[in-house]
Image (cartoon, helix red, strand yellow):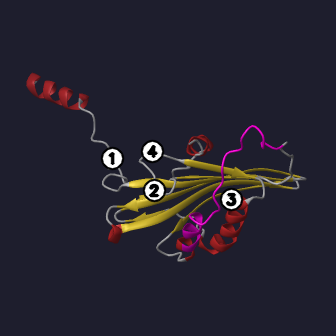
Amino acid sequence: MKVATLVLAALSLVAAPAAADPWSGLPVRTIYTIKQTGGGLGVMVEQIVVVQLAGGGDADQAWFVEQRRHDVRMGKSTFRHQWIDGRKCPALAGVLATIGKLPPIGFAGPDNMGAGWRSDTPYVTLMGPPADHQLGEVVLRRDLSGPVSQWWWSAEKTLEPCWQDNLILFRDGSVLPRLGSDEAAVAAGKP
């Protein structure tokens, strides 16, 4: 009786096995991050979008996009947390292809920095790998109504019918939210 009690007590101290991680065996990398923030005249937006590549070899890869967006329009707030499954949205491939066609930009020297400006237009930031990049290199471009903003606003219109409110299934598991909270969204927006 004492042995059985000791065995049961020992078994109760052993931790239960962890739940299976749906990400295990599924390489998922965030390739691009888009942020849109600001506005004015009663219209404000806070948006973070991550574009992820999931899978291994070329035949078993898929693009996924996740967004977390807060809008305020004339005092009315809305919130969206949505996904795009690149396997069901052919327009996504075209949008991604245009990133590499954004015009190049150089840094300003001390003699051509400009004076800056204020705007009621949100900033749009695009982060991603540079062309012919080394592992770990990231380019960040941010503008007000410039080429990055124009690209994203056009992309938003193109991708609008592709957004869905449900998690996306890939292989045997769901693509879990990378932007499941405001804190996660802030972290995802850092280079």
Sequence order check, earlier mark of 3 and 2: 2
Horizontal and vertical percent position of residue 100:
56, 64
The residue beneath circle 1 is 19
Q: CA distance from mark 1 to mark 3?
A: 41 Å
Sequence order check, earlier mark of 1 and 3: 1
Q: Which residues are magenta?
A: 94-114
Q: Nearer the viewer, residue 94 or 42?
A: 94
Is 42 part of what is drawn in magenta? no
Amino acid type of the residue tagged 4 in the rendering = Gly
Classify 133 as above or below 93.
above
Sequence order check, earlier mark of 4 and 1: 1
The residue beneath circle 3 is 148
The residue beneath circle 2 is 132
Amino acid type of the residue tagged 1 in the rendering = Ala
Horizontal and vertical percent position of residue 157:
69, 71
The residue beneath circle 4 is 136
Classify 141 as above or below 2.
below
Sequence order check, earlier mark of 4 and 3: 4
Amino acid type of the residue tagged 2 in the rendering = Asp
